Amino acid sequence: MKQQKVLVAGASGYLGRHVVKEFAERGYSVRALVRNPEKLAAEGENLEPAVADLVDEVLTGDATDLSTLKGATKGVDIVFSCMGLTKPQGNITNEQVDHLGNRALLEDALSNGVKKFIYVSVFNAEKTHDVEVVSAHERFVEDLKSSSMPHTVIRPTGFFSDMGMFFSMARSGHMFLLGEGTNRVNPIHGADLAAICVDAAEKDVPEIPAGGPDTYTFNETVTLAFEALGKKPWITHVPMWIGDAALFVTGLVNKPLAGVMSFAIAVSSLDSVAPAKGTRHLKDFYRELAAKD
């Protein structure tokens, strides 16, 4: 049987590395699409694995320069993309990366006879569609659904790497949390989500919502971080109206940063609990991060 080849777009990110590892361990040939190949060689700050030795090909490309994506899918059976803008970068927009960059990959995949396209969007998109980070993802989802390409859209609640940001703030001994912190979330470990993503390559399922095995309030996720660090929890709750005001002012001077802030505000005001999958626990993840300190 011919070895299947997969293109992993966003291969140097938190989820991307876990997906590269999962595909490689299941016998796929992996082509990694990244902006900075050097990132593949070292463990990430949230314990994502070094995967340079697991990829068969490395392709350097940038979603803001669509010409670098042309031909990326040639000879590929499956495209997996978690390529997206995760933090403000100058004047780069979510439209450029999350929507247009992925659309360019889709067009390339269609022209090269790719058999399936797997894309990672967000959970609760219908409740946060007015947030640009989400709407850019969903504009591509609509492109994907309206194409002739067989596809699966993965919808995670949030990654353990997102919780890693809470951990980083807890290191200082004091955490500012937007809202009352009573909204609930079941984040998922990158390795658990990677297994779901690779399973999707082998099944015919159009959409998969996914969360981790444990559900916590935001207050509880922060408290777990303090406990892993051996610190007494010190949490200051910031009223939502202050977040909204800060977002308005930021939007006047820094739209990319405002985009990230708007998503943070949105997820701080609603529950994000998807069907529980995976076996890895947030408490253990925090302990592993604390052991590195």
Image (cartoon, rainbow, N blue to C red):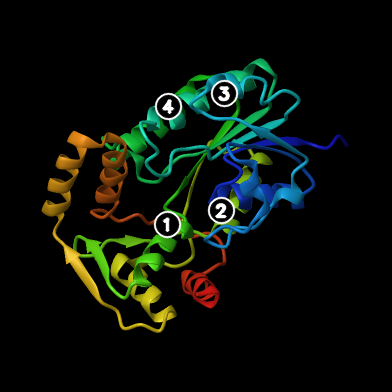
Identify the mark nearer the N-term, 1 or 2. Answer: 1
Identify the mark nearer the N-term, 1 or 4. Answer: 4
Q: Is mark 1 on a helix, strand or loop?
A: helix
Amino acid bearing label 2:
Leu
Q: Residue at x 42, y 26 (%)?
A: 96
User: In the figure, is residue 203 to the left or right of 132?
Assistant: right
Q: Residue at x 35, y 54 (%)?
A: 272
Tell me if residue 144 can be seen: no
Marks 1 & 2, CB-CB < 8 Å contact: no
* Mark 3 and mark 1: Cα distance apart in space: 27 Å
User: In the figure, is residue 227 to the left or right of 269?
Assistant: right
Identify the mark nearer the N-term, 3 or 2. Answer: 3
Amino acid bearing label 3:
Leu
Residue 69 vs residue 126, the one in the foreground: 69
At label 1, counting other C-alpha atoms closer than 10 Å, the crowd grade (few under 14, some 14-19, many 20 or more) is: few
User: In the figure, is residue 186 to the left or right of 53?
Assistant: left
Q: Where is residue 44 in the image (x, y as percent from the top left)?
A: 57, 57
Question: Label 3, on which residue?
Answer: 106
